[in-house]
Image (cartoon, rainbow, N blue to C red):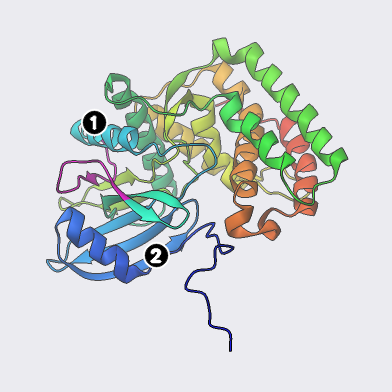
Amino acid sequence: MLSSPSHDFNLVASHTTAAASAVSDWVAQHYGPPVQQCYLIRRNLNDNYAVRATDGSRYVARLCAIRPRGAFNVDFEVALLAHLHAQGVGVATPVLAANGAASVTLPFPEGPRALVLFRHCDGAAPDTPEDLRLTGATLAQIHSAAQSYAGPASRYVLDGHHLAGRTLDYLAAHPELDPAVLEAYRQLIERLLSELASVEGTLTRVMCHGDTHGFNNHVYTDADGVQRAAFFDFDDAGPGFLAYDLCVWLWSNLPRKAPMEPDEALLKRWQQYLDGYRAGGGRVTDADLAALPLFLQLRHLWNMGEGVARIHHWGANMMSADWIKKQLDVMAAWARLELPPG
């Protein structure tokens, strides 16, 4: 009888999902609070776990996934959040490790991964017109307060290469994509980057949240009965364009099937979001508004790239070759989008 080997060197982990019990132990060991409950919330770009301490305090522990874009950006993210919180802006505040570090590095089969702990954001995703205005106003406060940020620099700038150039490389590695489709994407990305280069000098630049699709902030009522909004998940934050940070909410809500145009209800909600941004002190120029169709396409390309780059984790069906081909029509429709003046 052949004995089973103690280790199969052909078995290579591409992504490991840690048991909640392990995350519970790591949080208690490295951050201090004794943990009463811990469970996986979702696996997405990262693995997020809900944590409840024995004193009832709630946290979210993020196990950062190894991303094709490069090294973790945690030092910047945590410092930016601390700065925004000190400025009175509603954000999910980070918890430093017991040794004062922004994160804890843990050995995983696929390589070192960072564990970061945040205080839980109460409330729910924005829904009502008042929620949308408050969300827009709080985003404006983030942009304003971040102007005085002087901490560690972001490893990533949300420029054309980051949003679209990387995506072309990821698409080229897709195992089923037709060469003609890849060439169509190459031409599209080349055109969009050229368009961006021609207007970027006229656009407002801000410290972007990077993923303001409407589910990365909560609206809640504070102890004084005042409604407030708080943003979380700054994993994709970095210097970039205001038009990008604004367009992500619209991108999240636009239809992906014919006629692929916003209806009156969506346009009304979009206006409420913009009104809130201005009410919060934000300034949106005509050039920023005119660039929205461009950035809708760049956002879509960034999102596609993040999915295609995770075939090893999510599988090819999450971004199938057929679906990728259809997105060319979606972005062509968005390029023709005529939004009402803000």
Viewer can see residue 259:
no
List x then y, in percent, for residue 283. 43, 21
* Vertical comparison of 243 with 68: above or below: above
Relative horizontal placement of residue 45, taking residue 233 as reference (left or right):
right
Residue 5 horizontal/vertical position (percent): 52, 75
* Nearest to the observer: residue 62 or residue 270: 62
The residue depicted at 21 percent of the width and 34 percent of the height is: 88
Residue at the extreme front of the image, as rendered: 1
Residue identifier under label 1? 83
Q: Is residue 112 left or right of residue 251?
A: left
Residue 286 vs 329, above or below: the answer is: above
Q: Is residue 287 magenta?
A: no
Q: Residue furthest right?
A: 180
Q: Is 282 drawn above or below residue 11 in the view shown?
A: above
Question: Is residue 145 among the parts visible in the rendering?
Answer: yes
**Between residues 128 and 253, which one lies in front from this camera angle?**
253
Q: Residue at x 50, y 58 (%)?
A: 15
Mark 1 burial class by Cα count in 10 Å: few <14, some 14-19, many 20+: some
Tag 2 residue: 18
Q: Is residue 204 left or right of residue 62?
A: right
**Amino acid type for the residue under numbered disc 1:** His
Which three-letter amino acid code belongs to the residue tagged 2?
A: Ala
What residue lies at 78% left-to-right and 40% top-to-bottom?
328
Q: Secondary structure at mark 2?
A: loop
Distance from disc 2 to disc 1, alpha carbons, whole Å, reads 31 Å
Magenta segment = 89-105
Q: What secondary structure do most residues of the magenta stretch adopt?
A: loop
Residue 187, by quadrant, is: top right
Tag on residue 93?
A: none
| Mark 2 surroundings within 10 Å by alpha-carbon count, few (fewer than 14), some (14 through 19), many (20 or more) | few
Secondary structure beneath disc 1? Answer: helix
In the image, residue 81 lies at what x, y percent?
A: 28, 37
